[in-house]
Image (tube, rainbow, N blue to C red):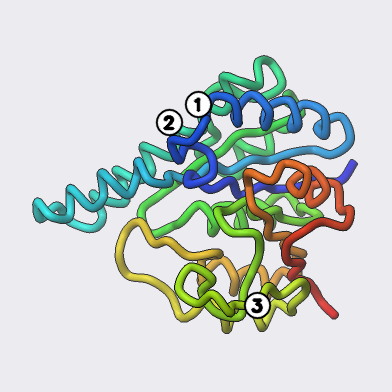
Amino acid sequence: MEKVVISLGGSVLVPGENDARYLRELASLLREVSTRVKLFVVTGGGRIARYYIETGRSLGVPERTLDEFGIAITRLNARLLASTLGGRANRAPAETYAEAAKLAKRFPIVIMAGTRPGHTTDLVSASLARSVRADRIVNATSVDGVYDVDPKKDPKARLLERIRFEDLVALSGRGHQAAGPSVVFDPVAARVLARLRTPLHVVHGRDLRAVRAAILGEPFHGTVVADE
């Protein structure tokens, strides 16, 4: 059975737009595909995490503490998702890669979240993929793939249906210094994938048809990052 890591953005999971309905439909999808692939889902923090981080920053809270705020929200989001999956997933998110691998022996779906300051959930996903030797990563985000420029700023942005790992590294930039970055895929995580050569499928997380296809390795609307 193939192993698939899903990096599920908090901006997709709980943006405040019919979240309960989306969670029910997502849970149904994950339960269904978990009979065909082993799933590892890493939840992000999204707007709720950014609210705490931005408010804390305005109060002079240190960046490490702000990261800890964000991690706490990712874990709360993980618990919310786990509660919709019933016995198919662990109720409390795994805190280490070793724990995630151990939980995979008991559950068809393993839930994980943030781990430590300075590590985005994209980086957690890439590191988890390395640890469990995943066949691919699905990045379920708030845009429908990787673009040549930011589509939120340039209406002429072009969707890139297939790119190389090196292209992803170049498009992701050099890195970030502050808590709560909002990028399509974390630059550090992109460099990890470039070393691993683990395929990355980037989809809009609320397009469940695309999410399902990306998980199963079928053609989908979005971006494939892989060797040529």
Tell me the SS state at disc 2.
helix
Quarter of the image that includes the N terminus: top right
The disc at residue 201 is: none
Specify the amino acid type for callout 1: Arg
Q: Earlier in the sequence, mark 3 or mark 2?
A: 2
Residue 207 appears left or right of 8: right
Determine the residue located farthest toward the left in the rendered image.
Answer: 59
For label 3, the crowd category at 10 Å Cα-Cα, with few meaning under 14, some 14 to 19 and many 20 or more, is: some
Q: Residue at x 42, y 46 (%)?
A: 46
Real-space Cα separation, disc 3 to disc 1, in angstroms: 36 Å
Residue 105 appears left or right of 94: right
Quarter of the image that includes the C terminus: bottom right
Residue 45 drawn above or below residue 80:
below
Camera-side residue of 18 and 213: 18
Residue 47 drawn above or below residue 31:
below
The disc at residue 158 is: 3
Real-space Cα separation, disc 3 to disc 2, in angstroms: 35 Å
Residue 74 drawn above or below residue 130:
above
Residue denoted by label 2: 76
Specify the amino acid type for callout 3: Arg
Residue 25 in the image: state x and y as whole percent.
68, 28
For label 2, the crowd category at 10 Å Cα-Cα, with few meaning under 14, some 14 to 19 and many 20 or more, is: some
| Dot 1 and dot 2 residues touching (CB under 8 Å) | yes
